[in-house]
Amino acid sequence: MGYFKTTLSGLSWTAALRGSIRLLAFVRLAILARLLLPEQFGAFGVAAMALALLEIMTETGINVFLLQEKDGLSQFINTAWLVSIFRGLIIALLVFVSAPLVANFFSTPDLAPLLYLTCLVPVIRGFINPANVKFQKDLQFNREFAYRLTIFLVESIITVSFAVLTHSAASFVWGLIFSSLIEVALSFILISPRPHWSFKLDQLKLILNRGKWVTGFGLFDYVFTQGDNITVGRLLGQAPLGVYRTAYSLSTLPVNEIVDTYYKVSLPVYVKLVGSPARLKSAVLKSVGLLSLTSLIISLAVFFLARPFVLLVLGSAWHAAIPVVKVLAFVGLFRSLSYSFNSLFVALRLQKYVTFIIFTSMLALLVTIVPAVSRFGVIGAGYSAVVSSLVSLPVAVFLAAKTLKSL
Protein backbone atom coordinates (compact mmCIF):
# COMPACT_ATOMS: atom_id res chain seq x y z
CA MET A 1 0.00 0.00 0.00
CA GLY A 2 1.43 3.41 -0.98
CA TYR A 3 1.87 6.24 1.50
CA PHE A 4 -1.21 8.04 0.19
CA LYS A 5 -3.52 5.06 0.73
CA THR A 6 -1.88 4.33 4.07
CA THR A 7 -2.32 7.93 5.18
CA LEU A 8 -5.91 8.02 3.95
CA SER A 9 -6.79 4.83 5.80
CA GLY A 10 -5.10 6.09 8.96
CA LEU A 11 -6.82 9.44 8.71
CA SER A 12 -10.19 7.74 8.27
CA TRP A 13 -9.82 5.54 11.34
CA THR A 14 -8.24 8.25 13.48
CA ALA A 15 -10.83 10.82 12.41
CA ALA A 16 -13.56 8.33 13.27
CA LEU A 17 -11.96 7.82 16.68
CA ARG A 18 -11.52 11.51 17.42
CA GLY A 19 -14.98 12.29 16.09
CA SER A 20 -16.58 9.60 18.24
CA ILE A 21 -14.67 10.73 21.32
CA ARG A 22 -15.57 14.38 20.79
CA LEU A 23 -19.19 13.56 20.18
CA LEU A 24 -19.22 11.71 23.49
CA ALA A 25 -17.32 14.61 25.05
CA PHE A 26 -19.92 17.12 23.89
CA VAL A 27 -22.73 14.97 25.23
CA ARG A 28 -20.87 14.55 28.51
CA LEU A 29 -20.17 18.28 28.72
CA ALA A 30 -23.81 19.11 28.04
CA ILE A 31 -24.87 16.82 30.88
CA LEU A 32 -22.20 17.96 33.34
CA ALA A 33 -22.84 21.65 32.62
CA ARG A 34 -26.34 21.11 33.95
CA LEU A 35 -25.24 19.10 36.98
CA LEU A 36 -22.20 21.07 38.12
CA LEU A 37 -21.44 24.75 38.64
CA PRO A 38 -18.77 26.79 36.82
CA GLU A 39 -16.90 26.91 40.14
CA GLN A 40 -16.68 23.11 40.14
CA PHE A 41 -15.40 23.08 36.57
CA GLY A 42 -12.82 25.61 37.72
CA ALA A 43 -11.80 23.49 40.71
CA PHE A 44 -11.16 20.46 38.53
CA GLY A 45 -9.39 22.74 36.07
CA VAL A 46 -6.90 23.70 38.77
CA ALA A 47 -6.35 20.04 39.70
CA ALA A 48 -5.86 19.14 36.04
CA MET A 49 -3.37 21.97 35.57
CA ALA A 50 -1.32 20.84 38.58
CA LEU A 51 -1.27 17.24 37.36
CA ALA A 52 -0.41 18.27 33.79
CA LEU A 53 2.51 20.44 34.94
CA LEU A 54 4.09 17.63 36.94
CA GLU A 55 3.56 15.14 34.13
CA ILE A 56 5.33 17.48 31.73
CA MET A 57 8.17 18.24 34.14
CA THR A 58 8.90 14.51 34.40
CA GLU A 59 8.30 13.72 30.71
CA THR A 60 10.92 11.32 29.33
CA GLY A 61 9.83 11.23 25.69
CA ILE A 62 9.46 7.45 25.76
CA ASN A 63 6.50 7.31 23.38
CA VAL A 64 8.21 9.46 20.75
CA PHE A 65 11.41 7.44 21.17
CA LEU A 66 9.59 4.13 20.62
CA LEU A 67 7.85 5.53 17.55
CA GLN A 68 11.13 6.72 16.04
CA GLU A 69 12.91 3.40 16.58
CA LYS A 70 12.08 1.15 13.64
CA ASP A 71 13.11 -2.06 15.43
CA GLY A 72 13.44 -0.99 19.06
CA LEU A 73 10.04 -1.73 20.65
CA SER A 74 10.88 -5.13 22.20
CA GLN A 75 14.41 -4.06 23.05
CA PHE A 76 13.42 -1.00 25.11
CA ILE A 77 10.00 -1.97 26.47
CA ASN A 78 11.14 -3.19 29.92
CA THR A 79 13.23 -0.12 30.71
CA ALA A 80 10.47 2.14 29.39
CA TRP A 81 7.88 0.47 31.64
CA LEU A 82 9.92 0.72 34.83
CA VAL A 83 10.75 4.36 34.10
CA SER A 84 7.02 5.00 33.58
CA ILE A 85 6.15 3.39 36.92
CA PHE A 86 8.80 5.39 38.77
CA ARG A 87 7.67 8.58 37.05
CA GLY A 88 4.06 7.96 38.11
CA LEU A 89 5.07 7.55 41.74
CA ILE A 90 7.15 10.74 41.67
CA ILE A 91 4.26 12.73 40.16
CA ALA A 92 1.84 11.42 42.80
CA LEU A 93 4.24 12.38 45.58
CA LEU A 94 4.70 15.88 44.17
CA VAL A 95 0.93 16.40 43.79
CA PHE A 96 0.39 15.27 47.38
CA VAL A 97 3.09 17.52 48.82
CA SER A 98 2.10 20.57 46.77
CA ALA A 99 -1.68 20.27 47.33
CA PRO A 100 -1.86 22.80 50.23
CA LEU A 101 0.34 25.26 48.32
CA VAL A 102 -1.80 25.03 45.18
CA ALA A 103 -4.99 25.46 47.19
CA ASN A 104 -3.53 28.51 48.92
CA PHE A 105 -2.29 30.03 45.63
CA PHE A 106 -5.81 29.93 44.18
CA SER A 107 -7.39 30.87 47.54
CA THR A 108 -9.48 27.68 47.54
CA PRO A 109 -8.95 25.63 50.75
CA ASP A 110 -11.35 22.85 49.69
CA LEU A 111 -9.20 22.18 46.61
CA ALA A 112 -6.64 20.14 48.58
CA PRO A 113 -8.86 17.01 49.01
CA LEU A 114 -9.48 16.98 45.26
CA LEU A 115 -5.73 17.08 44.63
CA TYR A 116 -5.14 14.26 47.11
CA LEU A 117 -7.60 12.10 45.17
CA THR A 118 -5.89 13.07 41.91
CA CYS A 119 -2.66 11.48 43.20
CA LEU A 120 -4.05 8.06 42.28
CA VAL A 121 -4.18 8.88 38.56
CA PRO A 122 -0.42 9.06 37.77
CA VAL A 123 0.30 6.03 39.95
CA ILE A 124 -2.14 3.91 37.94
CA ARG A 125 -1.09 5.35 34.58
CA GLY A 126 2.51 4.46 35.33
CA PHE A 127 1.70 0.76 34.92
CA ILE A 128 0.31 1.09 31.36
CA ASN A 129 2.20 -1.10 28.90
CA PRO A 130 4.41 1.28 26.84
CA ALA A 131 3.84 -1.01 23.86
CA ASN A 132 0.46 0.70 23.43
CA VAL A 133 2.24 2.85 20.83
CA LYS A 134 2.35 -0.28 18.66
CA PHE A 135 -1.04 0.44 17.08
CA GLN A 136 0.24 3.80 15.85
CA LYS A 137 3.73 2.55 15.04
CA ASP A 138 2.40 -0.33 12.91
CA LEU A 139 -0.37 1.82 11.39
CA GLN A 140 -3.05 -0.39 12.98
CA PHE A 141 -5.46 2.49 13.43
CA ASN A 142 -8.56 0.26 13.37
CA ARG A 143 -7.36 -1.52 16.53
CA GLU A 144 -6.48 1.78 18.20
CA PHE A 145 -10.00 2.98 17.42
CA ALA A 146 -11.55 0.23 19.55
CA TYR A 147 -8.88 0.54 22.25
CA ARG A 148 -9.12 4.31 22.80
CA LEU A 149 -12.88 4.55 22.38
CA THR A 150 -13.44 1.90 25.05
CA ILE A 151 -11.23 3.78 27.52
CA PHE A 152 -12.95 7.12 26.91
CA LEU A 153 -16.40 5.55 27.12
CA VAL A 154 -15.57 4.17 30.55
CA GLU A 155 -14.28 7.57 31.68
CA SER A 156 -17.44 9.33 30.47
CA ILE A 157 -19.84 6.86 32.07
CA ILE A 158 -18.05 6.99 35.42
CA THR A 159 -17.75 10.79 35.41
CA VAL A 160 -21.43 11.37 34.63
CA SER A 161 -22.55 8.67 37.10
CA PHE A 162 -20.59 10.25 39.95
CA ALA A 163 -21.83 13.72 38.97
CA VAL A 164 -25.44 12.53 39.14
CA LEU A 165 -24.86 10.94 42.54
CA THR A 166 -22.58 13.51 44.20
CA HIS A 167 -22.77 16.80 42.23
CA SER A 168 -19.06 17.11 43.04
CA ALA A 169 -15.96 18.15 41.10
CA ALA A 170 -14.44 14.85 42.23
CA SER A 171 -16.58 13.18 39.55
CA PHE A 172 -13.98 14.20 36.94
CA VAL A 173 -11.20 12.56 38.94
CA TRP A 174 -13.09 9.31 39.50
CA GLY A 175 -13.62 9.11 35.75
CA LEU A 176 -9.86 9.42 35.21
CA ILE A 177 -9.11 6.80 37.88
CA PHE A 178 -11.42 4.14 36.46
CA SER A 179 -10.43 4.78 32.84
CA SER A 180 -6.75 4.51 33.83
CA LEU A 181 -7.40 1.14 35.46
CA ILE A 182 -9.14 -0.06 32.30
CA GLU A 183 -6.25 1.13 30.13
CA VAL A 184 -3.70 -0.74 32.26
CA ALA A 185 -5.72 -3.94 31.94
CA LEU A 186 -6.32 -3.60 28.18
CA SER A 187 -2.70 -2.67 27.46
CA PHE A 188 -1.57 -6.03 28.89
CA ILE A 189 -4.44 -8.14 27.53
CA LEU A 190 -4.43 -6.84 23.95
CA ILE A 191 -0.88 -5.64 23.28
CA SER A 192 2.44 -7.40 23.06
CA PRO A 193 5.28 -7.39 23.88
CA ARG A 194 4.43 -7.26 27.57
CA PRO A 195 7.07 -5.71 29.83
CA HIS A 196 8.62 -7.32 32.88
CA TRP A 197 10.98 -6.23 35.63
CA SER A 198 14.21 -5.53 33.77
CA PHE A 199 16.23 -2.34 33.57
CA LYS A 200 19.25 -1.21 31.52
CA LEU A 201 20.96 2.05 32.40
CA ASP A 202 22.40 2.60 28.92
CA GLN A 203 18.89 2.43 27.44
CA LEU A 204 17.62 4.98 29.95
CA LYS A 205 20.42 7.39 29.01
CA LEU A 206 19.61 7.02 25.32
CA ILE A 207 15.88 7.62 25.90
CA LEU A 208 16.47 10.68 28.08
CA ASN A 209 19.04 12.17 25.72
CA ARG A 210 16.70 12.04 22.76
CA GLY A 211 13.66 12.95 24.86
CA LYS A 212 15.05 16.21 26.29
CA TRP A 213 13.52 18.21 23.43
CA VAL A 214 10.15 16.53 24.06
CA THR A 215 10.38 17.61 27.69
CA GLY A 216 11.29 21.14 26.65
CA PHE A 217 8.37 21.30 24.24
CA GLY A 218 6.04 20.00 26.95
CA LEU A 219 7.11 22.63 29.45
CA PHE A 220 6.82 25.50 26.99
CA ASP A 221 3.51 24.19 25.66
CA TYR A 222 2.21 23.94 29.22
CA VAL A 223 3.03 27.59 29.92
CA PHE A 224 1.44 28.56 26.61
CA THR A 225 -1.75 26.53 27.04
CA GLN A 226 -2.12 26.89 30.81
CA GLY A 227 -0.61 30.30 31.52
CA ASP A 228 -3.87 31.99 30.63
CA ASN A 229 -5.82 29.59 32.86
CA ILE A 230 -3.49 30.17 35.78
CA THR A 231 -3.72 33.94 35.37
CA VAL A 232 -7.52 33.92 35.11
CA GLY A 233 -7.83 31.65 38.14
CA ARG A 234 -5.42 33.75 40.18
CA LEU A 235 -6.73 37.20 39.24
CA LEU A 236 -10.44 36.56 38.63
CA GLY A 237 -11.36 33.41 40.61
CA GLN A 238 -12.75 29.92 40.03
CA ALA A 239 -16.03 30.82 38.30
CA PRO A 240 -14.35 32.91 35.55
CA LEU A 241 -11.76 30.15 35.21
CA GLY A 242 -14.53 27.60 34.69
CA VAL A 243 -16.08 29.82 32.00
CA TYR A 244 -12.75 30.43 30.26
CA ARG A 245 -11.59 26.78 30.28
CA THR A 246 -14.92 25.59 28.95
CA ALA A 247 -14.98 28.28 26.24
CA TYR A 248 -11.40 27.40 25.28
CA SER A 249 -12.31 23.74 24.97
CA LEU A 250 -15.38 24.42 22.84
CA SER A 251 -13.68 26.88 20.49
CA THR A 252 -10.37 25.13 19.89
CA LEU A 253 -11.46 21.52 20.21
CA PRO A 254 -12.67 20.97 16.60
CA VAL A 255 -9.45 22.27 15.04
CA ASN A 256 -7.27 20.62 17.68
CA GLU A 257 -8.89 17.31 16.85
CA ILE A 258 -8.02 17.73 13.20
CA VAL A 259 -4.42 18.68 14.06
CA ASP A 260 -3.99 15.83 16.54
CA THR A 261 -5.44 13.37 14.03
CA TYR A 262 -3.08 14.60 11.34
CA TYR A 263 -0.06 14.37 13.66
CA LYS A 264 -0.95 10.90 14.93
CA VAL A 265 -1.30 9.50 11.41
CA SER A 266 1.40 11.44 9.58
CA LEU A 267 4.23 10.84 12.07
CA PRO A 268 4.56 7.06 11.57
CA VAL A 269 4.02 7.49 7.82
CA TYR A 270 6.75 10.15 7.61
CA VAL A 271 9.10 7.94 9.65
CA LYS A 272 8.70 5.23 7.00
CA LEU A 273 9.34 7.77 4.21
CA VAL A 274 12.52 9.28 5.69
CA GLY A 275 14.60 7.24 3.26
CA SER A 276 12.64 8.61 0.26
CA PRO A 277 13.05 12.43 0.37
CA ALA A 278 11.01 13.19 -2.76
CA ARG A 279 8.02 11.16 -1.59
CA LEU A 280 8.30 12.63 1.90
CA LYS A 281 8.33 16.20 0.60
CA SER A 282 5.33 15.53 -1.65
CA ALA A 283 3.39 13.93 1.21
CA VAL A 284 4.13 16.86 3.54
CA LEU A 285 3.06 19.57 1.10
CA LYS A 286 -0.20 17.84 0.15
CA SER A 287 -1.10 17.02 3.76
CA VAL A 288 -0.30 20.47 5.15
CA GLY A 289 -2.32 22.17 2.40
CA LEU A 290 -5.38 20.06 3.18
CA LEU A 291 -4.93 20.56 6.93
CA SER A 292 -4.69 24.36 6.57
CA LEU A 293 -7.83 24.63 4.45
CA THR A 294 -9.81 22.40 6.82
CA SER A 295 -8.67 24.38 9.88
CA LEU A 296 -9.68 27.68 8.27
CA ILE A 297 -13.19 26.44 7.45
CA ILE A 298 -13.76 25.02 10.93
CA SER A 299 -12.44 28.12 12.74
CA LEU A 300 -14.70 30.42 10.73
CA ALA A 301 -17.67 28.16 11.49
CA VAL A 302 -16.93 28.31 15.22
CA PHE A 303 -16.67 32.10 15.08
CA PHE A 304 -19.97 32.69 13.28
CA LEU A 305 -21.93 29.98 15.12
CA ALA A 306 -20.56 30.69 18.61
CA ARG A 307 -23.86 31.84 20.14
CA PRO A 308 -26.14 28.93 19.12
CA PHE A 309 -23.26 26.52 19.72
CA VAL A 310 -22.72 27.62 23.34
CA LEU A 311 -26.43 27.80 24.18
CA LEU A 312 -27.06 24.37 22.68
CA VAL A 313 -24.17 22.59 24.36
CA LEU A 314 -23.92 24.40 27.70
CA GLY A 315 -27.25 26.12 28.24
CA SER A 316 -28.24 29.72 29.00
CA ALA A 317 -26.29 29.78 32.30
CA TRP A 318 -23.07 29.91 30.26
CA HIS A 319 -23.94 33.00 28.22
CA ALA A 320 -20.70 34.70 29.32
CA ALA A 321 -18.71 32.13 27.34
CA ILE A 322 -20.05 33.27 23.94
CA PRO A 323 -17.70 36.25 23.26
CA VAL A 324 -14.75 34.24 24.59
CA VAL A 325 -15.51 31.39 22.17
CA LYS A 326 -15.55 33.83 19.24
CA VAL A 327 -12.14 35.23 20.12
CA LEU A 328 -10.59 31.82 20.81
CA ALA A 329 -11.76 30.43 17.48
CA PHE A 330 -8.67 32.03 15.95
CA VAL A 331 -6.35 30.38 18.48
CA GLY A 332 -7.23 27.01 16.99
CA LEU A 333 -6.58 28.26 13.48
CA PHE A 334 -3.17 29.85 14.17
CA ARG A 335 -2.02 26.92 16.29
CA SER A 336 -2.96 24.42 13.59
CA LEU A 337 -0.93 26.34 11.02
CA SER A 338 2.07 26.63 13.35
CA TYR A 339 1.95 22.95 14.36
CA SER A 340 1.26 21.53 10.90
CA PHE A 341 4.94 20.65 10.32
CA ASN A 342 5.57 19.13 13.77
CA SER A 343 5.24 15.54 12.58
CA LEU A 344 7.83 16.22 9.87
CA PHE A 345 10.26 17.68 12.39
CA VAL A 346 9.82 14.76 14.79
CA ALA A 347 10.13 12.16 12.02
CA LEU A 348 13.48 13.74 11.06
CA ARG A 349 14.49 13.89 14.74
CA LEU A 350 14.39 17.70 14.69
CA GLN A 351 12.44 17.99 17.94
CA LYS A 352 14.41 21.15 18.71
CA TYR A 353 12.42 22.95 16.00
CA VAL A 354 9.14 21.95 17.62
CA THR A 355 10.44 23.21 20.95
CA PHE A 356 11.57 26.54 19.49
CA ILE A 357 8.19 27.17 17.82
CA ILE A 358 6.24 26.72 21.05
CA PHE A 359 8.90 28.73 22.92
CA THR A 360 8.06 31.81 20.86
CA SER A 361 4.36 31.41 21.67
CA MET A 362 5.14 31.02 25.35
CA LEU A 363 7.19 34.23 25.45
CA ALA A 364 4.42 36.19 23.76
CA LEU A 365 1.87 34.87 26.25
CA LEU A 366 4.03 35.73 29.25
CA VAL A 367 4.39 39.30 28.01
CA THR A 368 0.70 39.91 27.24
CA ILE A 369 -1.43 37.76 29.56
CA VAL A 370 -1.40 39.75 32.83
CA PRO A 371 -2.03 43.19 31.24
CA ALA A 372 -4.75 41.72 28.99
CA VAL A 373 -6.61 39.96 31.82
CA SER A 374 -6.23 42.95 34.16
CA ARG A 375 -7.77 45.29 31.58
CA PHE A 376 -10.30 43.14 29.72
CA GLY A 377 -11.07 40.30 32.14
CA VAL A 378 -11.77 36.80 30.80
CA ILE A 379 -11.94 37.92 27.17
CA GLY A 380 -8.53 39.55 27.60
CA ALA A 381 -7.06 36.10 28.17
CA GLY A 382 -8.48 35.16 24.78
CA TYR A 383 -6.83 38.16 23.13
CA SER A 384 -3.49 37.18 24.64
CA ALA A 385 -3.85 33.57 23.45
CA VAL A 386 -4.62 34.73 19.88
CA VAL A 387 -1.59 37.03 19.73
CA SER A 388 0.66 34.33 21.18
CA SER A 389 -0.51 31.78 18.62
CA LEU A 390 0.02 34.20 15.74
CA VAL A 391 3.57 35.12 16.78
CA SER A 392 4.90 31.56 16.27
CA LEU A 393 3.45 31.18 12.77
CA PRO A 394 6.26 32.90 10.78
CA VAL A 395 8.83 30.98 12.83
CA ALA A 396 7.18 27.66 11.94
CA VAL A 397 6.98 28.55 8.25
CA PHE A 398 10.66 29.55 8.15
CA LEU A 399 11.84 26.33 9.82
CA ALA A 400 9.57 24.22 7.61
CA ALA A 401 10.89 25.88 4.45
CA LYS A 402 14.44 25.31 5.61
CA THR A 403 13.77 21.64 6.33
CA LEU A 404 11.96 20.94 3.07
CA LYS A 405 14.73 22.62 1.10
CA SER A 406 17.27 20.31 2.69
CA LEU A 407 15.39 17.14 1.67
Image (tube, rainbow, N blue to C red):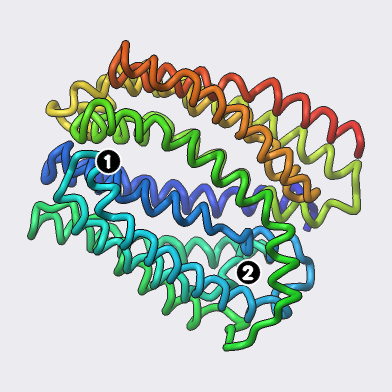
Q: Given the image, on which type of amino acid does mark 1 rest? A: Phe
Give the percent coordinates (x, y) of residue 82. Answer: 56, 78
Label 1: how many residues lie within 10 Å, few (<14), some (14-19) or many (20+)? Answer: few
Residue visible at 37% across and 46% down in the picture: 49
Residue, disc 1 = 105
Q: Tag 1's secondary structure?
A: helix
Look at the picture and state if 43 lies above or below 396. below
Nearer mark to the viewer, of 2 and 1: 1
Can you see residue 400? yes
Look at the picture and state if 386 lies above or below 10. above
Q: Is residue 238 left or right of residue 88?
A: left
In the foreground, 385 or 267:
385
Residue visible at 60% across and 48% down in the picture: 11
Q: Given the image, on which type of amino acid does mark 2 rest? A: Lys
In the foreground, 142 or 85:
85
Residue visible at 30% across and 50% down in the picture: 47
Residue, disc 2 = 134
Give the percent coordinates (x, y) of residue 345. Answer: 75, 43
Look at the picture and state if 386 lies above or below 396. above
Give the percent coordinates (x, y) of residue 169. Answer: 18, 51
Q: Which mark is residue 28?
A: none
Label 2: how many residues lie within 10 Å, few (<14), some (14-19) or many (20+)? Answer: some
User: For the view shown, which residue lies furthest in the bottom direction?
Assistant: 197
Contact? badges 2 and 1 (CB < 8 Å): no
Q: Is residue 22 left or right of residue 265?
A: left
Q: Is residue 191 left or right of residue 106?
A: right
Q: Is residue 333 left or right of residue 244?
A: right
Q: Earlier in the sequence, mark 2 or mark 1?
A: 1
Q: Tag 2's secondary structure?
A: helix
Can you see residue 303? no
- The N terminus - image quarter: bottom right
